[in-house]
Amino acid sequence: MAKEHETQEQEPKKKPNKVIPIILGVLLIGGIIFGIKEYIYYGKHIDTDDAQIDGDISPVVTRVGGYVDSIYFEENTHVNANQVLVKIDDRDYKVKLEQAQAAQVGASAGINVNQSQIYANEANSSSAKAQVTSAAARLDKVKKDYDRYANLVKDGSVTQQQFDQAKADLDVAQATYSASKDQYKAAVEQIGTTRSQLKVTNTGVSQKQVDIDFAKLQLSYTTVKAPSGGIASKKSVQLGQLVQAGQTLFNIVNDNSLYITANFKETQLDEMKNGQKVDIEVDAYPDMKLEGTVYNFSPATGAKFSLLPPDNATGNFVKVVQRVPVKIKISASKEVLDRLRPGMSVKVSVIKG
């Protein structure tokens, strides 16, 4: 027993393990450095990953109905502005145009007829006016003869029969004068009536011209052109298909229309303003570093623009931090923009100051 005790006293004592304190120290220092870096970073940046690339997408719809005659593009290919993309069978619309043109020719012929009637009525009016002048002269002579016979019959210089004849001639002359005046008045009124008819005919011709213009417009709609340059996609039209007016045929993602919609928390907007620089990271291209600029802010939160906006007036209220859409313009070359697509997720970092 004594020997065992001496052996135990001679064994060296175990040294304390220093690895764990070193590891803890390194982790503590790393955590402090990380915390300082994060504090400095977020002191100069405002981040969100609730953001995506957006763009102007133009739906192309038909303005007239008909059967699709030709298609001049492939899906997901680039098209130029005003490029003819779809042709609708236009034979029906050509016939309608010809009908409108024929109707205008008929209405124009009516103008010549009315003009001829005006000339004839003016001639009749001149003749009637001459008859009035002649009847007035005749009446004046017969009246003077009657006055003379009226004086002569008193002293017996003329017979009663001669006086009666003079009176009869006066009555006839007065009736003739009155009738000629009525004829002249009717001729003048007929001129006015014919001129009114001419105005109506002219209006009809103008209406026929409107019908022609409308028929030409409808005919032009059978040729569907690209409203802008971009990528044609979501094609939903085939050869021989019967399409209706207002039907969407495809969509065009417009060139140079890409931007970013970033949904920042309302608590992050205090230090944001238009014109601030933005760093952009695209999830699809991790190595692609983009820059942008804050362009404008939405006038309302995203919740207010939703189909069923929340109503907090019931009293069952739970406060939730709202998000406000912010539009960010992208500063990049065309080659870079061509790789981006609306709907891609991105992370944005607004630089304060």
Image (cartoon, helix red, strand yellow):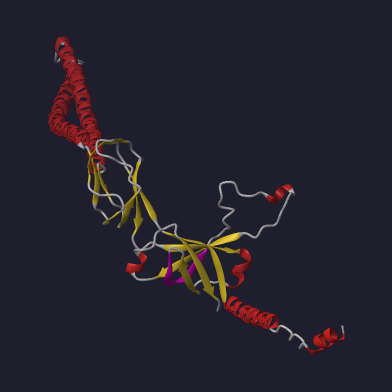
Residue 41 locus on image (x, y percent): 58, 78
Q: In which quarter of the image is residue 172?
A: top left
Residue 145 locus on image (x, y percent): 15, 22
Q: In this view, does 285 lie to the left or right of 129?
A: right
Residue furthest out toward the top = 161
Q: In which quarter of the image is the C terminus?
A: bottom right
Specify the segment rendered in magenta. 285-297
Q: In which quarter of the image is the N terminus?
A: bottom right
Q: Does the magenta stretch include residue 311?
A: no
Please tell me which residue is depicted at 20% across the width and 17% down the height of the picture: 171
Please tell me which residue is depicted at 35% across the width and 68% down the height of the picture: 336
Q: In this view, does 87 lie above or below 44?
A: above
Residue 150 locus on image (x, y percent): 20, 18
Residue 206 locus on image (x, y percent): 24, 39
Disc tally is: 0
Q: Is residue 52 above or below residue 219?
A: below
Judged by its main secondary structure, the magenta piece is strand
Q: Quadrant of residue 173?
A: top left
Please tell me which residue is depicted at 14% across the width and 32% down the height of the picture: 109
